[in-house]
């Protein structure tokens, strides 16, 4: 690890569900290690793939006598439909098996594989980005300990959107929203990391920290963090 954010107690067994983008993924972690994972990169196929993946994960845990302690779900922001499907499935498993519910901020989740890699300058800020259509992204800024430097927001990106941070230090942009910003953010302190997607197999460091902090969700009231209200598109048949 490149910092101590993930250095926590890790004696737990957690089912992880991630559906915030077109990618659908499920994983099981045991004692700080991912022991099962499935992912569908050809989506969005959440309604089809998620149930199958969860069934496989539960069968895997049962056959190996792994006692699940909790279910963790990516809480958003992200795809409105994807988040709804993921949270509904997570709640269903929790109710059915008497487990507790954890939620993992999706933008923090995007940072995990980046922090575990070797492409981030030591003093750089992290700017995960999720595509919100056109030139808008859901983003936040974190330091290397995942302390929030700038709150999560919906940004319409232009050359000056992140200038106050870029003028001071390196900023690494990544996620499916970063690709469309490469030609717009041309500051010399901007760097882009390709092929970073939120996956269930990276959820366990964040979920375990919440588990041992006792930061469980109230299943009756928990809803995804949509960030923006859902606006239904008119049917093409009506146009």
Image (spheres, helix red, strand yellow):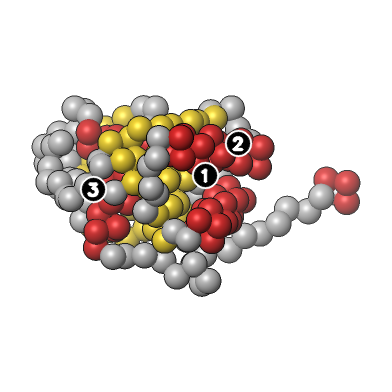
Rendered location of residue 61, percent (x, y):
43, 39
Q: Quadrant of the N terminus?
A: top left
As helix, strand or loop, the secondary structure at mark 2 comes to: helix
Q: Quadrant of residue 218?
A: bottom left
Verify CB contact (< 8 Å) between mark 1 and mark 3. Answer: no
> What residue is shown at x 54% (from left), y 61% (from top)?
95
Distance, label 2 to label 1, CA atoms, is: 14 Å
> What residue is shown at x 86% (from left), y 49% (from top)?
239
Residue that carries the numbered disc 1 in the rendered image: 19
Q: Nearer the viewer, residue 123 or 158?
A: 123
As helix, strand or loop, the secondary structure at mark 3 comes to: loop
Q: Earlier in the sequence, mark 1 or mark 3?
A: 3
Residue that carries the numbered disc 3 in the rendered image: 11
Q: Can you tell which of label 2 and label 1 is closer to the viewer?
A: 2
Residue 127 seen in the current view:
no
> What residue is shown at x 29% (from left), y 58% (from top)?
210
Q: Nearer the viewer, residue 70 or 39?
A: 70
Residue that carries the numbered disc 2 in the rendered image: 52
Distance, label 2 to label 3, CA atoms, is: 27 Å
Q: Can you tell which of label 2 and label 3 is closer to the viewer?
A: 3
Q: Can you tell which of label 1 and label 3 is closer to the viewer?
A: 3
């Amino acid at each position: 690890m490149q910092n101590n954010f993930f250095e926590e107690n890790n004696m737990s067994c957690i089912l992880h569900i991630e559906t915030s983008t077109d990618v659908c993924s499920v994983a099981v972690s045991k004692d700080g290690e991912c022991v099962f994972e499935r992912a569908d990169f050809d989506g969005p196929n959440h309604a089809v793939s998620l149930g199958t993946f969860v069934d496989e994960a539960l069968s895997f845990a049962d056959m190996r006598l792994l006692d699940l302690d909790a279910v963790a779900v990516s809480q958003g922001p992200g795809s409105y439909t994807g988040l709804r499907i993921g949270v509904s499935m997570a709640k269903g498993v929790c109710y059915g098996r008497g487990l507790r519910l954890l939620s993992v901020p999706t933008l923090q989740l995007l940072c995990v594989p980046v922090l575990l890699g070797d492409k981030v300058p030591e003093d750089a800020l992290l700017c995960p980005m999720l595509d919100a259509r056109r030139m808008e992204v859901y983003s936040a800024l974190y330091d290397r300990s995942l302390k929030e430097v700038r709150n999560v927001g919906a940004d319409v990106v232009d050359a000056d959107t992140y200038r106050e941070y870029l003028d001071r230090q390196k900023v690494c942009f990544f996620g499916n929203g970063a690709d469309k910003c490469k030609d717009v953010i041309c500051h010399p302190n901007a760097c882009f990391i390709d092929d970073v997607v939120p996956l269930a197999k990276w959820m366990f460091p964040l979920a375990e920290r919440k588990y041992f902090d006792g930061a469980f969700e109230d299943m009756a009231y928990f809803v995804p963090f949509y960030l923006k209200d859902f606006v239904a598109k008119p049917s093409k048949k009506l146009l």
